[in-house]
Image: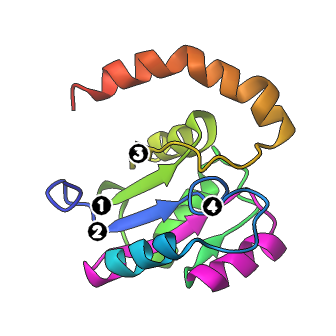
Amino acid sequence: MLKKKGISALIFDLDNTLIVRGDNKAEPEVLEWLRDLRRQGFKLCIVSNNSRGKGGKMARILDLPGVFAATKPRRWAFRKALALLGTQAGKTAVVGDQVFTDVLGGNRMGLFTILVSSRGGPDFILTRLIVRRIERLVLPWIIGRGSNS
């Protein structure tokens, strides 16, 4: 489906998208999935609000370039990822587990966005107490909007 839409590059969130937040390892199925995406010709990158230290360590484990301390949904990190990947917004998708960071940031840049379920790790406290509650309120509207595309 992504290739049919002209997508050739994927920008991933890190915590609770590729890895469980707080873990220092990647699940074997995630590593295999990333290898498969590369074999299919997709360019891959991480954009994470994580620090360069933790994010960089996980990027090395996942064998992906990354942009860290991203302050998503701000656009600068997505612009930097597009430059790292050598691609354009119309050919790139963002994959993440949060509406107000990953999806909003991607949409602000004109990227195709894919909201995935959290891998189930503990959320940052403000995310858990505030953001996830607001997401539950707006998600039905977002899902309804997405069914038209």
Residue type, label 4:
Leu
Residue type, label 2:
Ser
Residue type, label 1:
Lys
Element assignment for label 3: strand
Give the magenta range: 38-62
Q: Are marks 3 and 2 in contact (CB under 8 Å)?
A: no
Q: Is residue 132 above or below residue 50?
A: above
Q: Is residue 135 visible?
A: yes
- From the top left corner, tell me how far across and down residue 66 is, in percent: 61, 73
Please report the residue visible at 34 percent of the width from the left and 74 percent of the height from the top: 37
Q: Is residue 86 visible?
A: no
Q: Which residue is mark 2?
A: 8
Q: Residues within 10 Å of mark 3 (few under 14, many from 20)?
A: many
Q: Is residue 60 magenta?
A: yes
Q: Earlier in the sequence, mark 1 or mark 3?
A: 1
CA gap between label 3 and label 2 equals 13 Å
Q: Is residue 6 above or below residue 87?
A: above
Q: Quadrant of residue 91?
A: bottom left
Q: Is residue 9 magenta?
A: no
Element assignment for label 4: loop
131 or 72, nearer to the observer: 131
Please report the residue visible at 65 percent of the width from the left and 46 percent of the height from the top: 120
Q: Earlier in the sequence, mark 4 or mark 1?
A: 4
- From the top left corner, tell me how far across and down residue 27 is, in percent: 58, 71
Say which mark, if any, is on residue 91: 1
Q: Which residue is mark 3?
A: 113
Q: Is residue 32 above or below residue 82?
A: below
Nearer to us: label 4 or label 2: 4
- From the top left corner, tell me how far across and down residue 51 is, in percent: 81, 66
Q: Which residue is mark 4?
A: 14
Q: Quadrant of residue 15?
A: bottom right
Whether residue 119 sits left or right of residue 68 in the image: it is left
